Image (cartoon, rainbow, N blue to C red):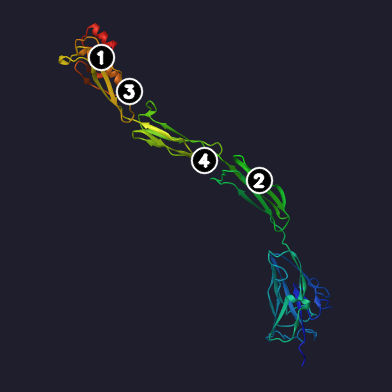
């Protein structure tokens, strides 16, 4: 019985093969080139692009017998005797891996057809570093599955070239913006835009901009940009710089029926208005209303620009009095006699008060120092006093005293139509 013989293990890539035998790498007519399918002494060399894979065909060749079955320890196809060949590619280079194959028959080295070849997929990941690597015999292992004998893998060694994939895209441009962010894409401080350009597949060339760019001036429309190219094409990017470091203007204003001395006599509307020359328009506090009487209501408001900066307006105090003061006439000096008469000069004083917009100012005292024969003339004098009071307070009064009668303006015609001597009339008009 023939003793078990060492078998040769052959690797094929595409249409070519590598014969793996017990001899060293210097082999004599037992290697089939992938390029010309000839038997020669050259060590096989294969290439793979990072991010893709290549098929490695592995087959067994008996060391004796000259045929595909004579002297082959695995026997013939279907007899259940197989070997598993594993290519451990990971230690060769990062990113390499291969699938194991199971072979159940030997092949005749002198025929073109490799019916027993099984294909292992050697994959180079996209991260695999380009370079030339030697896949040594110790990266192969053979496991018997019911077969006998020793299987050598010395001639399975081959050279593998990993190349970078062709660059079909431009460089990657990234930007880092530093500064105090406001609202709506605005910044409220100085801004620095730092550009970074990278390309994993080819050299990068800066065309314009890029690097670190600083902006310190308030602006609504400045720009930072970067343009670069590589073997894969050109890339550009830009960034709009908007800087406003200053808040808007803001002011309060009141409108309504104005009185005197800063007072209003009707409902008051307080509006807030402002502007910003850089990041306008601004948004201000809505109109506010004061409808109730007050001796001093404080209003506040603010405006905010598009950058998000706010300015508080100076407070505004509103004084509102819709009601006139009280007013009264009284005889403050004179010698009273019978029947409402006075027998000396008479002084008539006006007094009043207001709890909102006080103190009040009243008409000056009036002195009657001419004799008069009756109330008619005094009524006319009193009318003049009432008219002055109305100018001050807006009131209509009727007041009677012993010798002085005050009448409303509606009775002016009636009072003036009554007979009176010229001297009395002149005296009345003088008062």
The reply to whether the C-beta atoms of the residues labelled 3 and 1 are less than 8 Å apart is: no
Q: Nearer the viewer, mark 3 or mark 1?
A: 3
Q: CA distance from mark 3 to mark 1?
A: 21 Å
Q: Which residue is mark 3?
A: 361
- If the image is split into quadrants, where does the N terminus sit? bottom right
How far across and down, in percent of the image, does residue 106 sit? 74, 82
Q: Is residue 257 visible?
A: no
Name the secondary structure under disc 3. loop
Name the secondary structure under disc 2. strand
First-in-chain label (2 vs 3): 2
First-in-chain label (1 vs 2): 2
Nearer to me, 116 or 179:
179
Q: Which mark is residue 44?
A: none
Residue drawn at x 56%, y 38% is: 278
Q: Would you identify the image quadrant in which residue 108 lies?
A: bottom right
Q: Which residue is mark 2?
A: 213
The reply to whether the C-beta atoms of the residues labelled 2 and 3 are less than 8 Å apart is: no
First-in-chain label (3 vs 1): 3
Name the secondary structure under disc 4. loop
* Vertical side of 350 occupied by 83: above or below: below
Q: Which residue is mark 1?
A: 381
Q: CA distance from mark 1 to mark 2?
A: 88 Å
Q: Residues within 10 Å of mark 1 (few under 14, many from 20)?
A: many
Q: Which residue is mark 4?
A: 305
Nearer to me, 418 or 50:
418
How far across and down, in percent of the image, does residue 255 sit? 41, 31
* Vertical side of 91 occupied by 333: above or below: above
């Amino acid at each position: 019985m023939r003793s078990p013989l060492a078998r040769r293990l052959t690797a094929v890539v595409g249409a070519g093969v590598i014969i793996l035998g017990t001899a060293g790498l210097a082999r004599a007519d037992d290697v089939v080139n992938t390029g010309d399918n000839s038997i020669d002494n050259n060590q096989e060399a294969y290439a793979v692009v990072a991010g893709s894979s290549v098929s490695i065909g592995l087959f067994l060749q008996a060391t004796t017998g000259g045929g595909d079955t004579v002297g082959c320890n695995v026997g013939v196809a279907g007899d259940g005797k197989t070997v598993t060949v594993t290519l451990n590619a990971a230690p060769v280079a990062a990113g390499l891996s291969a699938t194991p194959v199971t072979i159940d028959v030997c092949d005749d080295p002198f025929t073109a057809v490799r019916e027993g070849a099984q294909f292992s997929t050697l994959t180079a990941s996209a991260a695999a570093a380009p370079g030339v690597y030697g896949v040594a015999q110790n990266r192969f292992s053979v496991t018997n599955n019911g077969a006998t004998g020793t299987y050598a893998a010395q001639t399975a060694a081959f050279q593998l070239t990993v190349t970078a994939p062709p660059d079909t895209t431009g460089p990657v441009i990234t930007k880092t913006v530093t500064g105090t962010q406001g609202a709506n894409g605005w910044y409220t401080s100085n801004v620095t835009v730092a550009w970074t350009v990278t390309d994993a597949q080819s050299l990068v060339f800066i065309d314009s901009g890029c690097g670190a760019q600083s902006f310190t001036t308030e602006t609504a429309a400045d720009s930072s940009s970067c343009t670069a190219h590589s073997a894969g094409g050109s890339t550009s990017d830009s960034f709009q710089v908007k800087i406003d470091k200053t808040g808007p203007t803001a002011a309060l204003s009141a409108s309504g029926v104005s009185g005197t001395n800063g007072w209003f006599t009707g409902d008051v509307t307080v509006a807030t208005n402002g502007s910003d020359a850089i990041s306008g328009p601004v948004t201000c506090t809505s109109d506010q209303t004061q409808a109730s009487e007050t001796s001093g209501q404080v209003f506040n408001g603010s405006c905010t620009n598009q950058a998000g900066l706010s300015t508080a307006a100076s407070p505004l105090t509103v004084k509102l009095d819709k009601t006139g003061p009280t007013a009264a006439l009284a005889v403050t000096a004179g010698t009273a006699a019978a029947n409402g008469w006075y027998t000396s000069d008479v002084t008539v004083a006006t007094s009043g008060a207001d709890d909102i917009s006080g103190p009040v100012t009243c008409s000056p005292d009036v002195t009657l120092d001419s004799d008069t024969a009756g109330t008619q003339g005094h009524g006319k004098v009193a009318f003049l006093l009432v008219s002055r009071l109305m100018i001050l307070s807006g009131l209509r009064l009727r007041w009677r005293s012993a010798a002085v009668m005050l009448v409303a303006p509606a009775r002016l015609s009636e009072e003036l139509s009554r007979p009176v001597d010229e001297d009395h009339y002149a005296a009345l008009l003088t008062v």
